[in-house]
Amino acid sequence: MKAKKRYTELTSTRDDFLDIAVQCSELTLPYLIRRDDGKVSHRNLRTPWQSVGAKAVVTLASKLMLALLPPQTTFFKLQVRDDKLGDELDPSIKSELELSFSKMERMVMDYVNASNDRVVVHQAIKQLIVSGNALIFMGKDGLKTFPLNRFCVNRDGNGNVLEIVTKELISRKVLGKELPEPKPNAVGNEGIKAGSDEDEVEVYTYVKLEKSSGRWVWHQEAFDKILPNSRSTAPKNASPWLVLRFNTFDGEDYGRGRVEEFLGDLKSLEALSQALVEGSAAAAKVVFTVSPSSTTKPQTLAQAGNGAIVQGRPDDIGVVQVGKTADFKTAAEMAGTLSQRISDAFLILQIRQSERTTAEEVRLTQLELEQQLGGLFSLLTVEFLKPYLDRTLLVLQRSGQLPKLPKDVVRPQIVAGVNALGRGQDRESLIAFITTIAQTMGPEAIMKFIDPSEYIMRLAASQGIDMLNLVKTQEQIQGEMQQAQQQQTQQALVEQAGQLASAPMFDPTKNPNLTDGEQNTNEENPNTQGNPTGDS
């Protein structure tokens, strides 16, 4: 089957999701999702009457991107399977392996930081929030994202992707001379000018999972012909095509976006915002009325300057007033309530305006908002982070920048997303636990019942900090204690030797019957002379 025909067949299932996505985009970011009309649309987009939706989408997308791809730490960790340590690996070399894995993790993060992956991922997350669907292609030149109006997908009953068909408009100059010449123009009987709609060719990319080989296979077609050098394959677990969803529902090939869940509030806020803006403009308009029987002419009133004196009666001149202040107040209060609900749904931090607002209250409010991301992180971790990491490791291993890792011994573990959220809760619990003990039982109870080394290790793990060569091990602590004891013993011996060297020598000529210690005692106490025992 031709790729164009398959794309047309799959659009029947996608159109319902695309219509809702276009509505969501018009209320938030109109440039994200457009209707699939087959042409690149350069018309002016509709501007919403409110900016709450745009702020909500951008804020949530930024938080999700920083949580999935943190800029300062790694989003994954290479670990050796514990069941392989005793059989195939010596446990003593575990620290050396962790050091090597840490270097490899930094190499991967350097590769990610040097690319434009975060820019494309941020764009894809905005697509997910608005439309609930996005497609990312991890090519040689970097990542590329496809909106919902440019791709179709087919899944099985378990939600696994079976087919992907994308549609692009590419210039003829890029594709080469293998394409047929464009038809002459009917009016001027001349060739199509470059830059026009006819100069762009619809190129379809057909991606399929072959059951026989278990690999992904794809090619590109234009005018129902396969383009040369467009065939390619990839392993099943390291596909460059990442089909992402925001929310899933059983039996649906496409996902649902966050905006769709609150589409009613956005529509209501849009209508109220339009009414308030137009009503405020009408209320701000100043119009004077002059009685027909008045001696003051309208022209005289219009030409009068500020502070001018004109002849007439004040009762004959009036001002048009709307008189809808109470109605505007009701609409403004409802718009404020809707804005608050939308801000809470999209994790926009709203700090209570009060003189007694403390930092602890702000921190707890932010923590409560972050806990709402649990369900969102779970799906993005499975459908984005894991395939993204597998594909990145495969590319770096093929290029020779990373050594090949045995899959049955070493496995990568995602530590960002929902796992980072769980670590944040562990950190708060640890701090609250220690604080409660110190406040109720005193600092002495901490030194008596809490193991400091274990607490430091758990706190570092809850914050995602690599403890290798940072936190001292028990062996290092014991070695330093033994070394300190040896130094103290040596210092004590040196001091004793110095005291012996500085003590006066025994002189037997003074009193041969006294020992050295007794002679010194008599010298210190002259009152005891003649009484060797010192008795009174």
Image (spheres, rainbow, N blue to C red):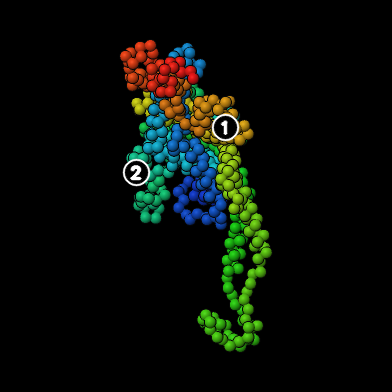
Q: Please say if 164 is above or below 305.
A: above
Front of the two marks 2 and 1: 1
Q: Please say if 426 is above or below 291.
A: above
506 or 99, nearer to the observer = 506
Which residue bears the numbered disc 2? 173
Which residue bears the numbered disc 1? 443
Picture quarter containing residue 171?
Answer: top left
Determine crowd level at label 1: few under 14, some 14-19, many 20+ residues with C-alpha closer than 10 A: few
Determine crowd level at label 2: few under 14, some 14-19, many 20+ residues with C-alpha closer than 10 A: few
Indicate left or right for 274 with 207 as reference.
Answer: right
Amino acid type, residue under disc 1 in the picture: Pro
User: Residue sitting at 55 percent across and 33 percent down?
Assistant: 427
User: Residue sitting at 54 percent across and 25 percent down?
Assistant: 451
User: Residue sitting at 52 percent across and 33 percent down?
Assistant: 420
Q: Please say if 225 is above or below 493.
A: below
User: Which of the two labelled residues, at mark 2 and mark 1, occupies the earlier sequence position?
Assistant: 2
**Residue 471 shows up from this direction:** yes
